[in-house]
Amino acid sequence: MVDNKHFDISIIRPEMRIQDLKKRGEGFSLEEIKGIKKGLNTLHTLETMAVNIYKLQISRKPTELNLQLIAAMGNEMTHLQDFQVKLFEYGFRPSKLRFLYWIVGLKIGLISRLLGSKAILKTGIWVEKKAVRHYSELLRDIKWDEETRRIIEKNQADEEGHINRWRRLLKKSG
């Protein structure tokens, strides 16, 4: 797990400048590149699912929960973009199977929304816990370049922030 104190998780969409982009992959072995590709595709597809879960959980009601879901969706969209950019920087393409995660996200989001706000919050906690676990495994098992590692750690801290937010709202709801 990443120490959240090193990241400002109140920032939903960090700034990115043209000089932040570069061709990546030099100095890595073929085996390491394969691991990076697999890891980035895993993160990209899981963030695709997360965006759709939150998108389908948001209703038209002017509630605190909806504002927090919108913030989480925007943050997950940033993560999705982070990993898509990294895929292209390494010369890779997103997985052709990512649409399956898109569909799974839609189903999870819609079902939890139909079950009500407590189900939305419990689903958020469950999904984000799994995300944090995946992030930890990928950070541990793959040799990343420092900039990419830092983005993954920031995104993991964001996911932990989502868990804490959903727990607070669940506790508040009784």
Image (spheres, rainbow, N blue to C red):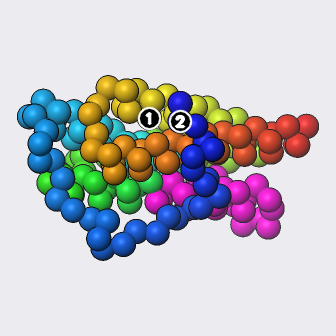
Can you give x and y, in whole percent of width and height, for residue 136 in the image? 45, 30
Can you give x and y, in whole percent of width and height, for residue 111 in the image? 62, 42
Helix, strand or loop under label 2: loop
Q: Classify 139 as above or below 48.
A: above
Q: Is residue 139 visible?
A: yes
**Callout 1 amino acid:** Tyr
Q: Classify 61 as above or below 98.
A: below
Query: Which segment is the magenta one?
Result: 55-78
Q: Is residue 61 left or right of residue 18?
A: right
Can you give x and y, in whole percent of width and height, for residue 98 in the image? 31, 46
Q: Is residue 130 visible?
A: no
Q: Residue at x 31, y 65 (%)?
A: 20
Q: Is residue 19 left or right of residue 151?
A: left
- Report which residue position mark 2 lands on: 2
Of badges 1 and 2, nearer the viewer stands 2
Q: Residue at x 21, y 41 (%)?
A: 37
Q: Residue at x 46, y 60 (%)?
A: 78
10 Å crowding of disc 2: few (<14), some (14-19), many (20+): some
- Report which residue position mark 1 lands on: 135
Instruction: Find out whether residue 73 is within the magenta segment.
Output: yes
Q: Tell me which secondary structure the magenta stretch mostly adopts.
A: helix
Helix, strand or loop under label 1: helix
**Do the numbered discs 1 and 2 sit on residues whose CB atoms are within 8 Å?**
yes
Instruction: Find out whether residue 17 is within the magenta segment.
Output: no
- The answer to which of 152 and 7 lies nearer the viewer is 7
Task: Name the quarter where the C terminus is drawn.
Answer: top right
Q: Residue at x 22, y 47 (%)?
A: 96
The furthest residue to the left:
30
Can you give x and y, in whole percent of width and height, for residue 157 in the image? 56, 43
The furthest residue to the right:
174
